[in-house]
Image: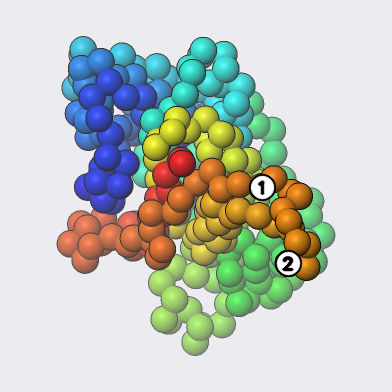
Amino acid sequence: MLQQCREALALQPGQVLCDCTLGGAGHSLLLAQDITPDGLLIGIDQDAMALEAASSRLKSAHPDLKVLTLQGNFSQLDTLLLEAQVPGIDGFLFDLGVSSPQLDIPARGFSYAQDAPLDMRMDPGNQTLTAAEIVNTKNEADLAWIIRTYGEEPWAARIAQFIVKERNRQPIQTTGQLVALIRAAIPQSARKTRGNPAKRTFQSLRIATNDELGVLESGLEAAIRWLNPQGRIAVISYHSLEDRIVKESFTRAQTGCICPPELPVCICGHTPILKALTKRPLVPTSAEIEENPRSKSAKLRVAQRL
């Protein structure tokens, strides 16, 4: 949703853009054109490999633009921006979910299409919890809750049951082992119309391994605080739970008085600080979905600081 993000953020020369999910710098390469020549592009990613590759691409494409890359999770946004001595941000971009380069590297363990260690950590250098640890240590009820809640998987209880039964026989350490278990757990009649049967379970484990929903909520709250007046924030989500968090965060920030209606005057002092620019989320065009099937579930919400 490159063009939609560009139009939504409406950046100007000399402004400060913070890409909180830099990844391969796909969005930033285009958005950098709008803040040159005197702007600042800040790229944040917890994946050191992604940061190095993105930094190289940005410097090559925009040699005159000041680029600052910061390694960390966007839940650490306050700390990262304070340490970088950034006074304020004119545009924030969050492109949620796992990046294509991470999916395409088998050793990272994100993909159900290739056999690899069951890892799924976004930041292997600083994270200790892996998807394998979740699969092999959580009790059956907790596993079912994770798979049902984060993956919206109707066969969550049965998948959890199969996982526990198998791990009592041997540890589940690879993506291939887990995919085989999921295929066995989901009846063949249900598998015919659902694409790869492992998709939802893998999504749920990735979210749980990286605490993606908790990180998102704290990251959005920090970003709203750092926005300059009239600055904008754009968030692309790929999961209904992510989209709900974005919508609720924007709603809270644009809510005025929260006093009980029976009070004659306001005593809470609560004032709106944000205005949502998208009543309903924007979605990819059919042409983009055809070109990039992974974008099919994407939803873009945009808000502006008052």
Nearer to us in this view, 265 or 282: 265
Three-letter code, disc 2? Pro
Picture residue at 41% right of the left edge, 72% below the top: 195
Is residue 42 shown left or right of residue 246?
left
Q: Residues within 10 Å of mark 1 (few under 14, many from 20)?
A: some
Three-letter code, disc 1? His
Picture residue at 69% right of the left edge, 57% below the top: 258
Nearer to us in this view, 169 or 1: 1
Q: In which image quadrant can residue 278 be found?
A: bottom left
Nearer to us in this view, 37 or 305: 305
Is residue 239 shown left or right of residue 51?
right
Query: Which residue is most to the front?
Result: 264
Picture residue at 25% right of the left edge, 15% below the top: 38
Question: What residue is pinned by disc 2?
Answer: 261
Is residue 150 in view from this perspective? yes
Residue 55 image position (x, y, % from top left) = 33, 20
Q: Residues within 10 Å of mark 2 (few under 14, many from 20)?
A: few
Residue 199 image position (x, y, % from top left) = 49, 63
Question: What residue is pinned by disc 1?
Answer: 270
Q: In which image quadrant can residue 145 be found?
A: bottom right
Q: In which image quadrant can residue 120 be found?
A: top right
Is residue 174 in view from this perspective? no
Q: Is residue 248 above or below residue 52?
A: below
Residue 21 numbered tag: none
